[in-house]
Image: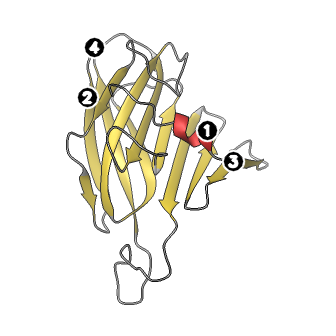
Amino acid sequence: MTRTSLLTLLLLFPLTSCTDGDGETAATTTDGDSQATANTSGDGDTETSAGETADSDTDATTGDSDGELILSDVTVNVTYAGEQTGTLSAAAVLNFPPQGPPLAAASDDMPTFPWSGTLNDLENGEYYIVAILDIGSDNPQSPGPEDLVSFTPMPITIDGADVVVDLELVDP
């Protein structure tokens, strides 16, 4: 499989949303085993986070003796020196190519490079981090051959501390 959309998978789950008085929209999608939340502000930026629902007999994502869930953020720095424009999406996934919804995502309709975004509230574990520039912003759910994709070649490990990942988009 070549390029795979990360955001398409979010569309496969039921969605609920609400808007606050400041023009920001929050949407939540769940499938019974996992939950994803998206927040959209009036500036065109979207940030999404999701987490697996923990089984009552496991505490693999707890980091202290009290059993508190430890969540970390991943700052994604994306560089691009080309002239292409489009919607930039960054996401954290468990497998590459992705086989389920992203566990956290951020997007920008009009990115300027270098770009920095945050993938919020990730549990301890290993994740691939991916950035996609949807050239022309014509299909953010399914990247085409014209779109630019960059990802971590190996999964990153999150163990209770915030992480920074640098990705570079390159013209073909």
Within 10 Å of disc 2 (Cα), the crowding (few <14, some 14-19, many 20+) is some
Give the residue pinned by disc 4: 171
Quadrant where the image shows the N terminus: top left
**Direction from residue 51 to residue 98 in the image, left or right:** left
Q: Earlier in the sequence, mark 1 or mark 4?
A: 1
Q: Secondary structure at mark 3?
A: loop
User: Which mark, residue 135?
Assistant: none
User: Residue at 73% of width from left, 48% of height from top?
Assistant: 17
Q: Residue furthest front?
A: 1
User: Which mark, residue 14?
Assistant: 3
Mark 4 vs mark 3: give the one in front.
3
Within 10 Å of disc 4 (Cα), the crowding (few <14, some 14-19, many 20+) is few
User: Residue at 30% of width from left, 65% of height from top?
Assistant: 161
Q: Are marks 4 and 2 in contact (CB under 8 Å)?
A: no
Foreground pick, 93 / 23: 93
Q: Amino acid at mark 3?
A: Pro
User: Percent position (x, y) of residue 144?
Assistant: 43, 17
Q: Amino acid at mark 4?
A: Asp
Q: Earlier in the sequence, mark 2 or mark 3?
A: 3
Between marks 3 and 1, how big is the CA–CA gap?
8 Å
Between marks 4 and 3, how big is the CA–CA gap?
36 Å
Figure disc tally: 4
Q: Secondary structure at mark 4?
A: loop
Q: Amino acid at mark 2?
A: Glu
User: Residue at 49% of width from left, 72% of height from top?
Assistant: 54
Within 10 Å of disc 3 (Cα), the crowding (few <14, some 14-19, many 20+) is few
